[in-house]
Amino acid sequence: MRGIDYRPPIIGALPDLNSPVHRFPPLLVLVALALLALAAFVFALTAGSVDVGIAAVARALLSSADDAGTGHAVVRELRLPRAMAAFAVGGLLALAGTMMQVLLRNPLADPYVLGLSGGAASGALTALFVGAAALVTPAAFAGALLSTFVVFGLARGSGAWAPTRLLLTGVVVATGWGALIMLLLTLAPEAQVRGMLFWLIGDLSGATRGGFALLALAGVLGVGMYFARDATLLSRGDLTAASLGVSVRATTLALHALAAFASAVAVTVAGSVGFVGLVVPHAVRLAIGNDQRWLMPAAVLAGGALLTFADTVARTIVAPAQLPVGVLTAIVGVPLFLWLLRRADR
Amino acid sequence: MTPPVRTPILACRDLALAVPGRTLCRDVAVDVHAGECWVIVGRNGAGKTTLLQTLAGLRQPAAGTIALAGIPIANCAPRWRAQRLGFLPQDTFDAFPATALEIALGGRHPHIPRWQPESAADVAKAREALARVGMADAARRDVQTLSGGERRRVALAMLLAQEPAVLLLDEPTNHLDIAHEVRSLELLANLAQNDGRAVVMAVHDLTLAARYATHAVLLGGEKVETGPARDLLTAEKLSDLFGVGLVAVAHSRGTAFLPV
């Protein structure tokens, strides 16, 4: 409840509170982001240690013949699957972040806020620890789902999930996973620690399930769009949404399931890539507002383009070595997010 | 000649309300007809909010039935219900930026099929609703830059844009200055009197309640009284209800209640 309207003393010029919000037309933003995603793909397919021009890339993509040289194989077998995985992971994380922010009515929520990435990492690291490297992917996915069920089971009050309670439960469960991860890192033999660290930071160098991740992204976006208008109203409170005819329980449950699935797929493919799921929805919302019908697809395009671009830079900037993309997203994401926060805090 | 029997637009029978560990009231029976303006008065914690949320179909009663246009509200599809009954909660959330127009447009939600965008007519209705609460100039402003009272008026505009036959409002005049308080209540009383809607609201200002209400619910725990406002909103009954001495001061424009 707001009490007395406190206004700080006037120092310098006040912003004009009567000015309309500054927004960009959402359709224009969507088209621009689609072009950006296309540009990110071109960059991802042409950049690297083997020089492949745009024409050669186009030829490699369009012809299935294996008469072409190394460029053909590099594009089709190395760069394209990796770019697809990067785009899908970026899109999934941004979309899951958008949904989590609405569900928790908190612009600072991200896909990992309920401890899902910790669960996935614990699963993956356990698999690495016991030497079952082949089981890393299923173990990560199982860990992510396990964490989700644990948090929702524990946070369930009298029939509903209150955002605050979910958040607190998620934070505590995440801390528990963190302890388990530290334990595994401490006990693991030296040779395994490097692989584990890459997994924790988020890395696409071993990503092979780009096609599956893209399919998951399309599915989650499709179902998400079905609930988009309800989600916009949900961000104004359960009571308001319910009074406007939104089935709050069903919608909340569906969006939580979608966000958890999207995050679990993303983490399974690439490890815990940070900041994409937090910064992208926030930045896109500043540009076009909180209408989920626009925000969801725009966040997918922006997140996908960003991670595709970042991953290409990560694998070329210190060539022949490769950086894990999570390092890059954090290095870019931290200052970007702080700047956005300062901008928003007028 | 007997007047024709009218079906109440909203009715409850044998209604009992409870919050965990406490029964708030029982055996509440109310018939709300089109054209009536009801006020719910009672002490803090008497159950005004619980009663309104229950009548709105957003909360299960401990016992009893509620019917909207003759149909048990528990059986109504949410969308069908929202086309006929609107609810203004005590508090709304503004966690994310949105323009006043976008928020008012949210009121059209139950009238728009799922995959369809808002029509020009919907936008016109949202703009008109904003104009009626004096927020037309703020249509493109971010709600997060508005004051508490202005946000309240935008929330009211959302309800007006919904165009329900029954309007339930939980302290609609929260955060409003006296001018907007009077204007908003006048607007609501007008919707009932001239537009054939039914209004049920919880209010704390007894003087304004007495001025605009046609009917009243006095929520006093074990004792719940319902009926015409002029019989219930008296100094004697209200003094009893609130446990504070009140005197009625008559004026040509109505009665004011003064604590003594």
Image (cartoon, coloured by chain):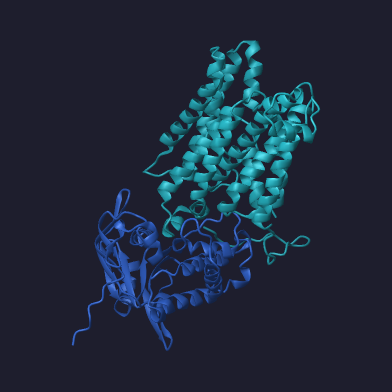
Chain colours: A cyan, B blue
Asked if one can make out residue A112 in the rendered structure from this viewpoint, the answer is no
| Residue B64 occupies quadrant | bottom left
Residue drawn at x 47%, y 39% is A257
Q: A10 or A94: nearer the eye?
A: A94
Q: How many labels does the image show?
A: 0
Residue drawn at x 67%, y 47% is A283
Would residue B240 be found to the left or right of residue A224 on screen? left
- Residue B205: x, y in percent? 43, 72
Q: A49 or B82: nearer the eye?
A: A49
Q: B73 above or below A132? A: below
Residue drawn at x 47%, y 33% is A148
Asked if one can make out residue B94 in the rendered structure from this viewpoint, the answer is yes
| Residue B237 occupies quadrant | bottom left
Q: B219 above or below A122? A: below
- Residue B140: x, y in percent? 63, 65
Q: A127 above or below B211? A: above
- Residue B9: x, y in percent? 31, 70
- Quadrant housing the C terminus of chain B: bottom left
Q: B104 or A11: nearer the eye?
A: B104
- Residue A266: x, y in percent? 58, 32
